[in-house]
Amino acid sequence: MFQKKRIKSIRPSSPNTHTSQDLNLSSDQQELKLELERAQDENAGLKQQLDIQTQVNAELKKLLVASIGNDFQYRLERLLRDKSRYEIEIQTLTRKINDLLEDIEKLTIKCDINQSKLAGSRVLIDELNMHKSVLSVQYNDCTNVIQRLLAERSKIAKELVQAHSSLSLLNEMALNNSRKHLSISPKFDLIQLSSYVQTLASSLYNYLKQTIFHQQANYRQLSIQLELTETETCALEILQSHTSVSSSVQASTNTIDKKLNDIEQIESMINRLKLVSQKKSHERFHPTTRYENLTLNCCRDCSGEIYIV
């Protein structure tokens, strides 16, 4: 209905209207052509710019890839160098650690040895202190006995001097003063004085036997048993104790090898000191001890490191 009404409304155009429409169409076509040409020109320029941009992007991509590859290669080389350097440092540190462990082990062995020596030294010091006390007591006893013996000797010497003076006077009186007194008193020791007193007594006995009794009296020697004084008995006991100690020391030293060096001789002297008190001493290897980190004595000619067996 609408189209029919529209058709009905169309009026027949005049010739003037057709010409004006043709002119309008031609001008529109020219404008369209111009726009098409401008569009084509712009399209060509854009294509050219696109090609140039594509080439630039390709070149940038190549440069970027190259720069990134160079950076990766540099980093990789640096990582490899660091790895090799770290490996060398690790090997060096490992050797140092092994050396330190060996030194620590050696020091541990030396510490064990020194501890065992210290323990042995303490035992020896205790025993030496005990022997020192025993020897000091024996020394005091010997000093007292010697002083008492000297006092007894002085007493005996005084009595012998008195006997000598008495016998000398008797001999002079018996011989009618035929012997003159000496201006200087003679010097005798105790043995010489006793023998001289015996000589004076014998001469006086012979004189009295020949001049007064005028008979040959049978010489009768009296058997006198001399007993030891208290001081001499004490001295004899001390000597017997020392003799027993020396015999025990001699019996113990007979078992020692004759080819001992200086260190073994010192040890034998220490063993002799141990036997003075006649008590059992703790040797280095005692049955009650635990045999850990054993060390062996060696002579002074031995050298080298000590290893735990």
Image (tube, rainbow, N blue to C red):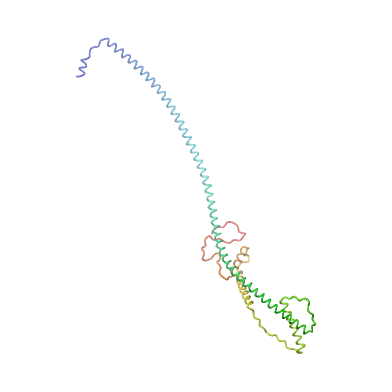
- Name the image quarter holding residue 116: bottom right
Identify the residue at the far front of this view: 183
x and y percent of residue 288 in the render? 51, 66
x and y percent of residue 69 in the render? 47, 34
Q: Report the front residue among 64 and 210.
A: 210
| Quarter of the image that includes the C terminus | bottom right
Identify the residue at the far left of this view: 1
Q: Report the front residue among 218 and 2.
A: 218
- Name the image quarter holding residue 38: top left
Q: How many marks?
A: 0
x and y percent of residue 45 in the render? 40, 21
| Quarter of the image that includes the N terminus | top left
- Name the image quarter holding residue 31: top left
Seen in the image, is 157 located left or right of residue 134? right
x and y percent of residue 211 in the render? 77, 88
Q: Vertically, is 47 above or below 166?
A: above
Q: Vertically, is 40 above or below 283?
A: above
Seen in the image, is 283 located left or right of residue 69? right
Q: Vertically, is 105 above or below 90?
A: below
Seen in the image, is 49 located left or right of residue 240? left
Q: Report the front residue among 255 and 112.
A: 112
